[in-house]
Amino acid sequence: MFTEWFEPAVLVVVGFLSGAINAVAGGGSLLVFPALLATGMTPLVANVTNSVAQGPGFVGAALSQREDLGGNRLRVVTTSIAAAVGSVLGCVLLMVLPGSVFDAVVPVLVGLSALLMAFQNTIRKWLGNPDPTAPDRTTMLTVGIFFASIYGGYFGGARSVIFIAILVLAANDTMRRLNALKSWLGLIGSAVTFVVYALIAPVDWVAVLMLAPTTVLGGWVGGKLAQRIPATLLRYVVVVIAAGVAVYMAMDWLD
């Protein structure tokens, strides 16, 4: 009786926290993934369910920043195509490769996501501020978004951090406009994974129905509180949890 209501309650709460953390600091999906594992899901099922449940949260972010997408149609078109094709390829790789491959690499992916979350501000400082007057490095930008989207379709944790790092490195514009493009590319990747996973992946739709609405609600609340809550604190909470999950899964796989 206890587990009948406890696990759904945990998912509802974690979904809300994930949405709020995404709005304030990013990386909320790394909070949902271990919660899904704790319900007894395999890593593969937890991954695809997490990806589908996180999708609605990107809609609001992309729509709210849509006005900042104008001014460079070529950049938007080329990166959008790269994001869509890369995401499809990542989803296909997840489905066709043996589950043992995902079980083996997921601790590395979770650990990588934790590192990217921990050092995202340092990475931005290394890359410097983009120069809005300089031309884009179009080939580097398109190829970078393509491979980042393969990663996003396969796993997805901290995908937005990778996107923004590539955009700052290869696309020259204001950070506000690059951030808007990052949100748009995240929406494309989420839409692709939603469709592909819905058709061919073992998604736990009951969990999605519990997570998706609370993720959206958490995102709305998080957006309202974004100026009051230290983003650094929330980010490192996610980092610690993700690092712990990576170590636990690595030890479990080695056993």
Image (cartoon, rainbow, N blue to C red):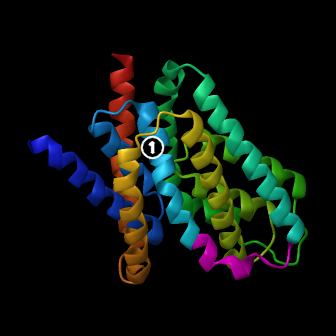
Please indicate, yes or no, whether residue 47 appears anywhere in the rendered image: yes
236 is higher (above) or lower (below) than 25: above
Check disc 1 and report the residue beneath it.
49
The answer to if 70 sits in the magenta stretch is yes
218 left or right of 27?
left
Identity of the residue drawn at 71% across and 70% down: 178
Identity of the residue drawn at 38% across and 60% down: 18
Judge by depth and name the residue closer to the eye, 50 or 182.
Answer: 50
Which kind of residue does numbered mark 1 sit on? Thr
The image position of residue 97, as x and y in percent, is: 60, 22
The image position of residue 252, as x and y in percent, is: 33, 23
234 left or right of 165?
left
Q: Which residues are magenta?
A: 61-72
Please indicate, yes or no, whether residue 145 appears anywhere in the rendered image: no
The C terminus is located in which quarter? Answer: top left
44 is higher (above) or lower (below) than 114: above
The image position of residue 238, as x and y in percent, is: 38, 55
61 is higher (above) or lower (below) than 10: below
Q: Quadrant of residue 218?
A: bottom left
Identity of the residue drawn at 73% across and 50% down: 84
Q: Quadrant of residue 91?
A: top right
Judge by depth and name the residue closer to the eye, 161 or 81.
Answer: 81
How crowded pointer 1 is (Cα within 10 Å; few <14, some 14-19, many 20+) is rated as: many
Identity of the residue drawn at 40% across and 40% down: 204
52 left or right of 151?
left
The N terminus is located in which quarter? Answer: top left
